[in-house]
Amino acid sequence: MLAEGPLSKAEISHRVGSVPQLMSSSVLKSLDQVVFSESKLDAARKAKISEGFAAVAAQSQEGASAYNLNFRTGGRIGPNAFALPDGTLVLTDELVDLAGADDDMIIGVLAHEIGHVEHKHSLRQLYRAAGTVGLIMLIAGDVGSATEDILTQGGGLLALSYSRDAEREADSRSAELMLAAGRDPQALMRFFEVIQKKLGNGEGPGILSTHPPTEERRQAIAAYVETLRKKQAP
Ligand SMILES: [Zn+2]
């Protein structure tokens, strides 16, 4: 329980402001305990992905320094990538393995995750998962195991999918950022086609279950890329 007296208004407002950071570190810490293990990718592979990611993140609203890419073995979470509201991104070895040597596909997925952060989708999702009690505990400074349980529920949080509109926004952002960084803006969709062939249809864990690749999505990205290219042309 809390030992301190009532919080001042300034202190409360400061703590409310740091909720995204508190939530993010709490979630990553719990996932590290419950599902993740250390990445087994070799250092050169990690460096190349990090470099490509930094170039794309540099095109984002907040710039590259706002993002922090982490590598993990996903375990139950499988081939996946996700973003926490403070700009912490996690990429699993399993996803890298599926993409093979095609870095554009990996960076396209990460650019999509930047889109979720910029549009505050991740924050809203975590607020929903934490509920009022979890938020009050975070703000009160009682970031104990109960808060962590509420936020992660053994990784169940990651099984929540974003709305279709949120996906469309993140897809568009991926195309914009990839194009701006001189990479293939349709790499994200190529990735979904590849994994759909390899894994089948969205059964079990992994990015397919939280990000169902629909024909509608594919067409929307293709059309958006065409618009972007027209805008770029002299
Ligand atoms: Zn998404």
Image: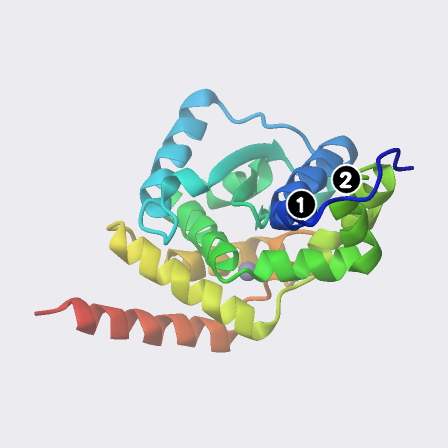
Which residue is denoted by mark 2 in the rendering? 141
Assign the C terminus to one quadrant of the image. bottom left
In this picture, is 40 found above or below 20? above
State which quadrant residue 202 falls in. bottom right
- Circles 1 and 2 in contact, beta carbons < 8 Å: yes
Q: Amino acid at mark 2?
A: Gly
Q: Amino acid at mark 1?
A: Arg
Left or right: residue 129 compared with residue 14: right
> Which residue is nearer to you in this view: 141 or 130?
141
* Number of numbered callouts drawn: 2
Mark 1, ligand 1, within 8 Å: the answer is no
Mark 1 closeness class: few <14, some 14–19, many ≥20 residues within 10 Å: some
Distance of mark 1 from mark 2, alpha carbons? 8 Å
Question: Is residue 204 visible in this depiction of the protein?
Answer: no
In this picture, is 105 found above or below 54? below
- For image coordinates 88% across by 33% down, the residue present is 3
Residue 110 picture location, percent across and down = 46, 49
- For image coordinates 44% across by 71% down, the residue present is 218
Q: Which mark is residue 163?
A: none
Mark 2, ligand 1, within 8 Å: the answer is no
Residue 10 picture location, percent across and down = 64, 47
Question: Is residue 76 visible in this depiction of the protein?
Answer: yes
Q: Which mark is residue 15?
A: 1
Task: Tell which circle, 1 or 2, labels the residue nearer the N-terminal end.
Answer: 1
In this picture, is 121 found above or below 32? below
> Which residue is nearer to you in this view: 46 or 204?
46
Residue 49 picture location, percent across and down = 41, 35
- Outermost top residue: 43
State which quadrant residue 90 falls in. top right
Mark 2 closeness class: few <14, some 14–19, many ≥20 residues within 10 Å: some
- For image coordinates 74% across by 53% down, the residue present is 157
Assign the N terminus to one quadrant of the image. top right
